[in-house]
Image (spheres, rainbow, N blue to C red):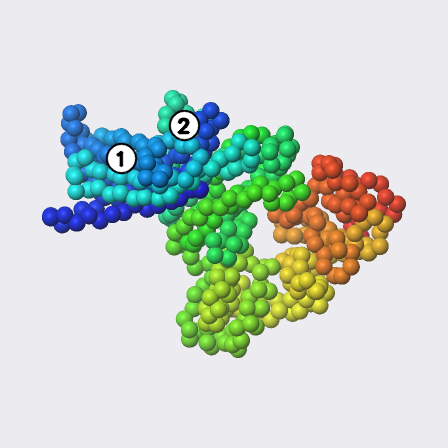
Amino acid sequence: MKKLATLILILISFYGYSNMRAYFYYAPFYNQNQGSILETYLTVIGNSVSFKLNENNKYQSSLEVVMLFKQDGKIQEFMKYNLLSPEVADSVTFPNFIDQQRISLKNGTYYFELSIKDNNDTLKKYTISDVITVDYSSDAFEFSGIQFIESYKQTIEQNKLTKNGYDLTPYVSDFYPTNMNQFIFYCELYNTNKLVGENEEYLLMYYLESASSKVTLNDYSKIKKQKAQSQTVIFGELNIEKLPSGTYNLVIEIRSRENTILKMKKITFTRSKPSLDKLIPEFDEGEVASSFVAQYTNVDTLIEYINCTFPISDNMETVYAKTHIESNNIKNMQSYFYGFWVKRNFNHPEQAWNNYKEQVKMVNHLYSSQIRKGYESDRGRVYLQYGAPNTVSESQHEPSAYPYEVWHYYVIKDETNKKFIFYNPQIAGNDYDLLHSDVTGEIYTKNWERVLHKRNTTLSNPDEKNADEHYGGKAKDMFDNPR
């Protein structure tokens, strides 16, 4: 329900080319008193319009802006106004300037037409059109549109940019250049109480993902617990200083207390950060052709080898890897695979790969199932990422509990005495899921004991940590006091 448009029109006149440049987009919101509201955002590039001396002896631009909303050829709503730029003292530099408007609309589909005319230069004019649908219901859950924010500050005096006590300066573009290191957005949720129940708790999560591969970037994610109500504000901010160039989605999810996705909304943006683009070293064809990867000429084999590096890859490497796999280009994949191992062992990349490949063979032997290969399993991933655990405690036939394993590590990075608990909710087979860990960045399940004993334990209260007492139950003791 939010459309982003770049409005650039080159006009040809008797005197040559005349170029007015502006950026426009809109986002729908809902107000209990006014109904559906469309917010429009416009940025005008200062040096693309005409500035003239005004009565204050300052330079200023003046634009005529007209918005029409039509249904069946009839104008249902319209807005016409003059947009004035800030005044400037000289004609050396003309600043960009912004405009934001709010228009009340009844639910329905509209043919939208926007025209902008430079009052100081009639040759500079353009018109664009779009189809806009507004369809909010007071009886069902809805997302508002998503507004990109350039900057914000606390409101001193109410104005057009004010929302919930802050003045939000819109960022009227979906392109984030290298000098922009904060990704800020605003969104509203309506009627979460109709979705999950009055005053019930739910999880609100937002994160970035690769637009092409849909890989979630865990370093760019936030999650918080919320109580359901008629309206909730999301004012999100992520530091993207280390986000490489690429096309990404901002994803907003509403999840149940059981972590089930109930609703989702996405919006796409583009990032440019050339200084970070070479996360994997690049090599000329000759160097790659003379390296150990030259022996891997079968596409399927190379894809399998790249896939098995995911347990030790960071988020961006995974995105890059999947992009190369999707290309199905053997040379691109060879170059990526070679660079991956050079990055880990510059002097002996082949040895690093061979050592890792032996570990992959072992986890495939130990943890493969009919569902997935060992390196794709949770136990295989943890083993490859952190190494062999110091102790493993198994329980296959404990009354009321699913089969489970407790892994204990003396040291993981800079953490000591860390544990993982895996369980098999299918009971049969060899496919164990990671249920809980106290390692930073891993899955943390507060009520893991109750989930483990779900066969005979109710989960009506997710805040209850301890399982009901069961004969022979020893999972908590094994986790707290690993053998």
Q: Between 198 and 354, which is closer to the camera in this rendering?
A: 198
Q: Position of residue 318 (x, y in %)?
A: 53, 58
Q: In the rendered view of the protein, which quadrant contains the N terminus?
A: top left
Q: Between 478 and 69, which is closer to the camera in this rendering?
A: 69
Q: Is residue 389 left or right of residue 312?
A: right
Q: Nearer the viewer, mark 1 or mark 2?
A: 1
Q: Amino acid at mark 2?
A: Thr
Sequence-wise, the earlier of marks 1 and 2 is 1
User: Does 387 appear above or below 29?
Assistant: below
Q: Amino acid at mark 1?
A: Val
Q: Which residue is mark 1?
A: 65
Residue at (30, 39) in percent of width and height: 114
Q: How would you rate the neighbour count of disc 2 (Cα within 10 Å): few for under 14, some for 14-19, many for 20 or more?
A: some
In this view, the residue farthest toward the right is 471
Q: Which residue is mark 2?
A: 162
Q: Between 110 and 98, which is closer to the camera in this rendering?
A: 110
